[in-house]
Image: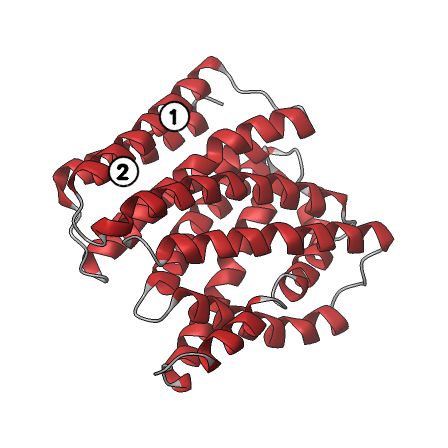
Amino acid sequence: MGEWIVSLDGTESGQWLATGLALLAALLHAIFGALQKGRHDPWLTRGAIDGWLFVLTLPMALLLVPRPDAQGWLILAGALAIHFVYKCGMALAYARGAFTVVYPVVRGTGPLFAVIGAWVIFGETFAPMQWLGVAVLLCGIFGLAAYNLAHIELQRESLVPALLFAFATGALVALYTTYDAYGIREAANPFTFLAWFFVITSVDFPLIAMVRRARMVAPPPLGPLLRRGLIGAVIAYGSFGSIMLATRLDKVGEAAVLREVSTVFAALIGWLVLNETVGPRRMVLMALIALGAVIVELGS
C-alpha cells in the first residue's frame, strides 16, 4: 500500500486522489471538531480521543509497519510538540466560544500561512487565479470574525479571547500541515509515519484529561466520554490521515486550502446537531470561504 501511494506521486491519478482525500478530510474534520466541542469538556473529550488513538494504533505500529529511522524519530518528536500546542489552543478556543464561531476562524486562517510555508519549504507557487481564491477565502474569514464580534450573543463575555485563540490556533494548523507534509515525504513508507505519528502525538492529552477530571467537583461519567472518544479516534484516522496523504501526493498549499470547505460542513453540523444559530449572513460568509478554496483548486 505504501509503495502504491509513493508510485502515484506527481501523477494525474495522484492529483485526483489527493483532491478526494482533502475533501474527505474536510468533512471528517468538521465532524471531529463538533465532537470535541460537544457537551463534554473539550479537554476531557480530546484526552479520551487520544487515549483510544494510542491504544488502537500502538499494536499496528509495532506489528504492521517498519520502525522510523533516527531522523524519523526526531521529526515525530517535533510533531508531538507542535500538535500539543495546537490541541491546547483548540481546547482553549472551544471552551470560550461557540463551535460555529471558533471553527471557521481556526480552519480558515490556516491556509494562508500554509501556502506561505509550502512556498518557503517546498518551493510551491500559486497562479494568479489561485491567489484570487485565497483572497476570497480570507474575505470570508475576516468578515465572519467581524460579524461574530458584532452580533453573536452566545458566550459573549469570552468571545474576543475565543477569536484570538482561534486565530493563533489557525497559524498552528498551517504549521502542523506543513511540518507533517515534510515528515510524511521524508519517510520511505508513508504509513510508517502515519502509524507512529498517531502513537507519539497521543501520549499527552490522556494524562492531562485524567488530572483535570480528578480535580472536578462533579466529573462526567466515564462511559459516554469513552464512547465519544472511540468515535473521535476512528474519525481522526480518516481526517488527519487523509490530509497527510493528500500532501504527500500533491501540493501542500492546495490540499490545505481545499480542506477548508470543512467550514461549510461545520456550519451545517452546528446548526443541525449542536442547535447553534447560523443565519443567512453567516452562511454566506462561510460559503465565501468554501468558494475561495474551490477557486484555488480550479485555478491550478
Disc 2 from disc 1: Cα separation: 15 Å
Q: Relative to 47, does residue 280 appear above or below in the rendering? A: above
Mark toward the viewer: 2 or 1: 2
Res. 1 visible in picture: no
Q: In the displayed orientation, state which residue is furthest to the left.
A: 280
Q: Residue 160's quadrant in the figure?
A: top left
Residue at 45% x, 21% y: name it.
130
Asked if labels 1 and 2 touch by Cβ distance under 8 angstroms, the answer is no
- Crowdedness of circle 1 by 10 Å Cα count: few (<14), some, many (20+)? many
Which of the labelled discs sits on residue 286, or is there none?
2
For mark 1, what is the residue?
Answer: 295
Q: Nearer the viewer, residue 8 or 231?
A: 231
- Image coordinates for residue 251, horizontal then vertical, percent: 59, 32
Residue at 54% x, 39% y: name it.
174
Q: What secondary structure is marked by label 1? A: helix
Q: What secondary structure is marked by label 2? A: helix
Q: Amino acid at mark 1?
A: Ile
